[in-house]
Image (tube, rainbow, N blue to C red):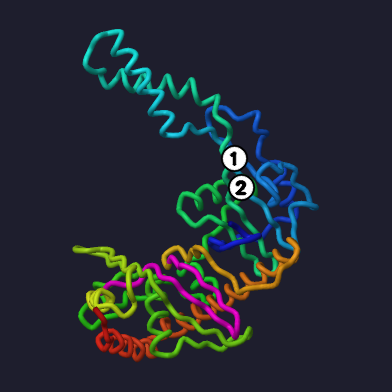
Amino acid sequence: MGFESGSLSFRMFYMPHGMPEDSVKRFSRHAAPPLDHLGREAVRGWVSGRHLLDREIDDDNAFLCGYLRLTLMKAERKIPDALLRAECQIQELSELRDQGGSGLRRDRRLAIRKEVLERLLPQMPPTLTGISMVYDGNAELLLAGAVTDKQTESLSNALRETLGEAPIPLTAATAALKRKKVNVRDLDPVSFTPELEDELAGDHLGQDFLTWLWFYSEASGGLLDTDRGTFAVVLQGPLTFVMEGEGAHEALLRKGQPLVSNEAKAALLGGKKLAAARIILARGNEQWETMLDADRFAFRGLKFPKGQPLDPVSRFQERMNGVETFREGFLALFDRFLDDRADPAAWKSIRKDIHGWVTGRTAKR
């Protein structure tokens, strides 16, 4: 699923100098090649947001509701693993019968595998995948379905080749600098437990934010007034805790009620911080739900408020409005965190409250 329907997984990116005026022509020059050019190696290129074979990119199909909407398409031929193994075994058994031996040497098995690959690969139909992206010119933000490091690298390389510069992923660090002129290098590490000194705590701002968000949702009710209305935030499992250094680095709590479990309290007391959790953001009767990767600021499986049945264009506009509202509510919470985190006097008091919240948690078995 992508920007048009279903749940949405995406990251946000800054474009250092915005989108060039001739961007459509640039994307058109780097459009995906025809599939009849596909050989043994994968090929990549741009297609419109309508479908993965729409190689014609112009002003009419590159924009929808004022948003630049394109997809980085990848085409490759793949042999199913089961078919490859079966074909290799057929060849190996045939040679064993002819030679009367009990087994083949490793180098011969590798040679057989290579021969089978070269024979079968040209017969395989193309496999198409795509990374969808939408550029919001008003917010000067690029939204893309590149939630893994590999996808982000592919998208960045393609945009660098097409536009002459790569996008900057919106992470806790880049958002802090862009929105509040806060440099993470100026922030000292902070521990969320009285049982670990600050100097020994990790200095990942995204993890600090998500752990603070948990505290804020429980200790302060999770309410925040903004220009777009009052938002409320709550966290749910599964929860992923991490901690740098020796010992157990990561803990995943999934079953039961992880937020009030003994394991969650033990993780917090031991100095672990939240690296991923499900967050629910609400405004009035509207509700968004997603898994947040705190280090990447990647949103997985974002669910939108229920809407009315609409035609495809109106539905896309409604979903983009929903993404914008969710984004602004989420970043308003991040700004609230930054205001406290970058103020030594305010953070000293909040840090004390967080320590009390951790030690005083009521845990269930």
Contact? badges 2 and 1 (CB < 8 Å):
yes
Q: Which range is magenta?
A: 271-293
Q: Residues within 10 Å of mark 1 (few under 14, many from 20)?
A: some
Q: Residue lying farthest right?
A: 60
Residue displayed at 58% across by 74% down: 326
Disc marking residue 323: none
Residue displayed at 74% across by 67% down: 310
How far apart in space, not on screen, are marks 2 and 1 (Cα)?
Answer: 7 Å
Which quarter of the figure has residue 345?
bottom left
Which of the pair 78/359 is nearer the observer?
A: 78
Disc marking residue 72: 2
Q: Residues within 10 Å of mark 2 (few under 14, many from 20)?
A: many
Q: Amino acid at mark 2?
A: Leu
**Dot 1: element:** strand
Q: Earlier in the sequence, mark 2 or mark 1?
A: 1
Name the spot of residue 12 as percent of width and height, x first: 56, 63
Residue displayed at 22% across by 77% down: 196
- What secondary structure prevails in the magenta region? strand
The number of numbered discs placed on residues in the rendered structure image is 2
